[in-house]
Image: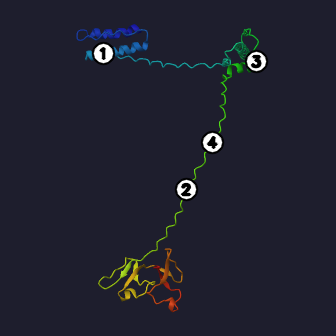
Amino acid sequence: MKSFLLLLPLLSALALAEECQCPQVKCPADDAVKLCNCINGRETMCVERCPDYKPTYLPCPASPLPTASVPCATATPSPPKCVCDRILCPMIWPLSCHCANGVAQACYDKCGGAPPVLQVCDRPTAISTLLTLTLAPPSSPTKTPLPWKPTTTKKPIPTKPTSTAKPVPTPTGAHAICGGGRGSNIQCELGFLCMKDPFKPGCGPECDGPGICVEDKMCGGFAGFGCKETGQTCVDDPRDDCDPKRGGADCGGLCVWAS
């Protein structure tokens, strides 16, 4: 069958030898799939070179899929390997010898195997003696105490008493001047009113005299409002008809600095 497949392209090429020559391709003969694909490829190449050539394509078998190898599970898992404990021995004879024998014996008792060959050691020295000899720090020379010297105590220097500063007196507030003559009448700021100073004689602005600017804020009255500034006095408001000197009660007033 394989030889017949090889002869088919050759016979087709000989038939067209006078007109066109197909290329010669060597195909592998050890694999049927590769051989079939190679022959079909050669037919395609022949058509490309000789357009009048009619190719003969063969049905090729499918390539087998590779099978993944699945590892077989063992029925009994292998036990873990025994590992001996690692112990550091002191590098002091004969403690190092006795320690090595103890490590070998402990490994044999744990993991088994061949019996250990123990070393011949001298009589062990007391551990406390070894620690005293190896770990004790060198003794430092004892310092000779210096001869006794009398200590002199310095007398404290007396400090000057701090001067007690007298409290600064709080200045008494003052009112701005207002009123005056017709040619030089001074007005108060917004929120203040011009009135006669109740602590000074005279008629004040009513007779073109000077007055004081007082904040237009009520004090006293039925609610008994007080002045917000310490040192001010609530006096009668001259703008109303209520006058405590004439029998008025709960009259409203204005806060004035006592001059």
Closer mark to the observer between disc 1 and disc 4: 4
User: In the rendered image of this protein, does residue 231 appear above or below residue 88?
Assistant: below
Would you name the residue on which mark 2 appears?
Answer: 160
> Looking at the image, is mark 3 or mark 2 earlier in the sequence?
3
Q: Element under label 2? A: loop
State the image coordinates of residue 105 (x, y, percent, origin top left).
Answer: 73, 14
Closer mark to the observer between disc 4 and disc 3: 4
> Looking at the image, is mark 3 or mark 1 earlier in the sequence?
1
Crowding near pointer 4: few (<14 within 10 Å), some, many (20+)?
few
Closer mark to the observer between disc 3 and disc 1: 3
Q: CA distance from mark 1 to mark 4?
A: 123 Å
* Residue type of the residue flagged with mark 1: Met
Q: Which mark is residue 45?
A: 1
State the image coordinates of residue 78 (x, y, percent, origin top left).
Answer: 66, 18
* Residue type of the residue flagged with mark 3: Ala
**Colour scheme used in the picture?**
rainbow
> Looking at the image, is mark 4 or mark 2 earlier in the sequence?
4
Q: Which mark is residue 152?
A: 4
Q: CA distance from mark 3 to mark 1?
A: 97 Å
Q: Nearer the viewer, residue 51 or 182?
A: 182
Which residue does the image show at 50% across and 76% down from the upper left? 231
State the image coordinates of residue 77 (x, y, percent, origin top left).
Answer: 66, 19
